[in-house]
Image (cartoon, coloured by chain):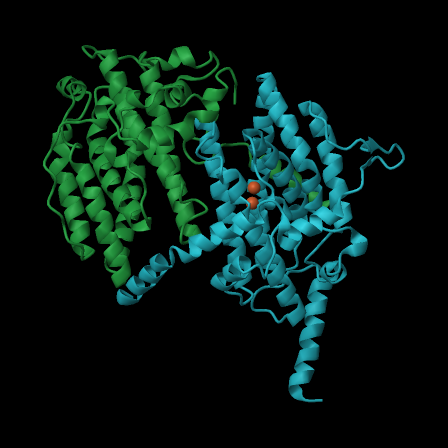
Chain colours: A cyan, B green
Amino acid sequence: MTAAALDDVDLQAYFDATIAAGHRIEPRDWMPDGYRFGLIRQIAQHAHSEIIGMQPEGDWLLAAPSLRRKAILLAKVQDEAGHGMYLYSAAETLGADRADLTDKLIERRQKYSSIFNYPSLTYADVGVIGWLVDGAAICNQVPLCRSSYGPYARAMIRVCKEESFHQRQGYELLMTMMGGTDAQRAMVQDAVDRWWWPSLMMFGPPDDDSPNSAQSMAWGIKRHSNDELRQRYVDMSVPQAEFLGVTLPDPELSLDPETGHYRFGAIDWAEFQRVIGGHGPCNDERIARRRAARDDNAWVTEAATAYAEKYS
Amino acid sequence: MHEETVYDALDQAHGGEGHWAFGTGFDDPLAGVDTTVPDGVDPADLGTYCLMLGDDALVLAPRLTRWVTRAPELEEEVALANVALDLLGQARLLLARAGSVGVLGRSRTLAGGTIPDEDALAYFRDPDEFRCAALVVAPNGDFAQTLVRLLAAATWRLALFSRLRDSRDPVLAAIAAKGVNELAYHRDHAGRWVLRLGDGTAESHRRAQAGVDAVWPLLADLFTATDVEARLTAAGVAVDPATVRDEVRAVLDEVLTRATLRLPDWPADVAPSGRLGRHGPELPALLGDLQGLARAHPEATW
Ligand SMILES: [Fe+2]
Ligand SMILES: [Fe+2]
């Protein structure tokens, strides 16, 4: 056995012990390639979701029906850009390059959350996205505050604080609308009808069909299974829906007195596969917008680089 | 369990509004400020003047917001959103001030009773009741033109706001005092981009120059007082726009020179038109999108 190989064994043992002790891996620490590349993929897809997720709500910035709502929405969309930036930075600590990750998004070589491929049709969608989509994101992300990778865990703590505010803002908008006119109440119910099922898909495929999960759990970059998190989200959302006065569009939704959890109907995984595979209602326009932002403004980035070089 | 602790911590972290940008708060933006109109000032004039300054911000904000999800860099989306949030905050305070002195025009009869004055004014006035300058109404053009326009608008507004800190109207003075820090950042941010673009590549130089050439004619009516501004200037409430002309020109001259851009001739001063409610077709188009939803539901609360 060569010295280098011996070193690898020691490093692997040290890495394994760090994970087993629940301590964090930091950028300069040795890590297996699978861990590094798995994390880059996970963090990049998370970052892409933040950035693409700006679009469905951002489309309402101009028409937001009060100045206070407009300011709240703008602050929220701006937060999401910030989330994308922290996450791309976390990926860069693993050796990734942000421009390259953006290219992968635009060339559809990396995915983002399927939920953002649905259109936002009325202003109630802004509230429902805050309540359900940010709510589901929180369920997914709070456990990641304990991710074994330090920069990711720290980014998640900051992101989760803001997501929690987004969720409350969304819910508060819906409460206000439910206390408004009949047309507003109808808008809220319609938005809930359209977003509920896609929000359940945000937790990813069922556990028996989730290929990367076991290794991710062992490495501490995933803390709970997709189905566990989905169940937690449903249990959290049903009472909130009741309090709001809307009906969730699932006739099978009922409290199981034995387990204390809500049972829910079958998710249309064929639809999920279609949307994640690029054939949802808005995939093309979401990607086209980012492509145009990159390509039509390439001259700006080139100018900034040239100027910085000239005066460095 | 660990997660529950994290959730609790999240809840406590949100006691205050600190996280949110200025202007997003829940409270009446003028709560606690003395709104008495100073002696010898016509409330209608004061309200109209607030609309002029408020509408400039209200109309420029969505132009900048348009770049969010479309900008060359994420950092720039955040920065332009910040500028827009500041402007939106200024617009809200100014429109609320106009409303507080009774300048609401037809809007109050169209808007439902639960709609606050700031929204009645923003959403239920027709284009000819808007008093913004042509400089802010013009479409964005490309990134260079957007930043040149922002530079010009922020320079002009900063010059006005710096002087308005001494206004006899305590509300205007307070709004101006808060606004100058924001506007100084806006001017700085835009100025840095104009330098980078002017002195960057041949392509960016060409575009920045084209932006300057497109924006410069819009400076023609910024420095001529309307009757309302003249009366309020005499009363110590407003700033005579003619008094900021030299400062604005000097700042723009310096930035353009450093950016290696050619300084076009200054357009001759002309009589105000936007300030009197006369606008080109771009304003009705913008307001159609901005106001459509609110107007479709005049009895709604949002
Ligand atoms: Fe986010
Ligand atoms: Fe969010």
- Asked whether residue B90 appears in the rendered view, the answer is no
**Quarter occupied by residue A90:** bottom right
Residue A265: name its quadrant: top right
At a point 57% along the width and 45% down the height, the residue shown is A282
Residue at x 75%, y 41% (from the top left corner): A232
Image coordinates of residue B186 in percent, x first then y, are: 30, 42
Residue, far bottom: A1
Q: Which residue is more in the foreground, A210 or A236? A: A210
Left/right placement of residue B26 relative to residue A205 reads left
Quadrant where the N terminus of chain B is found in the figure: top right
Q: Residue at x 72, y 73 (%)?
A: A13
Horizontally, residue A252 falls left or right of residue B59, namely: right
Does A56 appear above or below B52? below
**In the image, is residue A295 above or below residue B241?**
below
At x 63% / y 50%, what residue is drawn? A279
Numbered label tally: 0
Relative depth, front residue between A29 and B213: B213
Residue A34's x, y, as percent?
A: 67, 69
Between A74 and A120, the one nearer to me in the picture: A120
Query: Seen in the image, is B63 located left or right of residue B297?
Result: left
Split into quadrants, the picture shows ligand 2 in the one at top right
Please say if B153 is above or below B147: above
Q: Is residue A163 visible?
A: yes
Image check: A80 left or right of A228?
left
Q: Position of residue A214 (x, y in %)?
A: 77, 60
x%, y% of residue A305? 34, 63
Q: Does residue B298 lie above or below B164 as drawn?
A: above
